[in-house]
Amino acid sequence: MERFLCIINRCIASHSAKSTALAAGVLLLALAAAGLTAAPAHADARDDILIGLEAARRGAHEAAMRYYTKAMESGELSSHDLGMAYKARALSYHDTGHPDKALSDFEQAAKLTPGDPDIYYNRAQILQARGQQEEADKDLQRAAQGFAQRGNAYIDHEKYDAAISDLTKALLFAPDSADLYIVRGLAYKLNGSLDKATDDYTRAIELAPDDPLPYMNRANTLLKAEQYGMALMDYDKAIELDPKYADAYFNRATAYEKILEDEKAVEDYTMAIKINPEDAMAYKRRGELRKGMGQNSLADKDFAKAFKIDPNLDTAN
């Protein structure tokens, strides 16, 4: 299996929030129960929030606000759930024509759950409608960063649809961010949407043609799609841009194995080992190839080295 790379720790390209037009009155809120903390000590207050969310979904905002307020005044909510209640009530205040109260509730929500990008996105729309563009731009910047970070976190937790949704929102604010396309491409790949992943990596290459990472990721996707020739071309480009890209050699070796070019695969595993002498898996894979080629002595040495580096690695052959 090839190695895939994400760019969770790479910086998101800077962008201007002013370039993004907002649709007036279109606010975001995750209504799923998953937005609340699990197994609360007091379920009644949490249930009141859920009842309020359902009422708001039906347009019964006055009833929704009564339930939110009841839950907030109970003293039984966790900090996170209290922040969600403030956010939900803020949206109902907005929809019933009370922007000042909505802004006040968003402020409380931001204090309780500062990492929630929906808060900043929604508050920005109200601020923009009031002509407070500078404050709105700051909130949009926070929203963009928050959507990107939450999207990355969703990938870590294997929630790929949610990751794609958040990363798509982040791209509304940063349409020229190659990094965001790479991360969303990874989410599409892990979700099995290989064509969409390839499209995102291609867009990243257009934006950052000298960066080996999108070539590497597109090659991995093409490899999974069994398009071995095209994958090899992308691995070649990644290595051309970064001759010390150990994982690109490792993955290119995998592609060579798929087309039965065992000698070339051995050469690439050897390069991966030269760059990273502690790569136990590269030793193991090279050993497997060498054994299949009848080079038993060399294979045994590779298996012994792999086991020495990682005693937990299965080198039984």
Image (cartoon, rainbow, N blue to C red):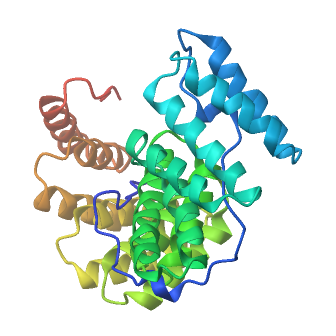
Residue 153, above or below 64: below
Which residue is pictured at 66% across the width and 57% down the height? 28
Image spot of residue 256 (x, y percent): 43, 65
Q: Spot the residue most to the top.
A: 41
Residue 82, above or below 165: above
Q: Which of 180 and 264 is in front in this view?
A: 180
Which residue is pictured at 21% across the width and 41% down the height? 280
Q: Can residue 222 be seen in this view?
A: no
Residue 200, above or below 55: below
Q: Which of 214 and 94 is in front in this view?
A: 94
Q: Can residue 252 be seen in this view?
A: yes
Image spot of residue 19 (x, y percent): 50, 88
Image spot of residue 156 (x, y percent): 44, 43
Which residue is pictured at 10% across the width and 51% down the height? 277
Q: Locate residue 75 relative to residue 91 in the image: left or right.
A: left
Number of residue marks = 0
Q: Locate residue 60 relative to residue 9 in the image: left or right.
A: right
Q: Nearer the viewer, residue 266 or 167?
A: 167
Q: In which quarter of the image is residue 35?
A: top right
Q: Quadrant of residue 249?
A: bottom left
Quadrant holding the C terminus: top left
Which residue is pictured at 43% across the width and 42% down the height? 113
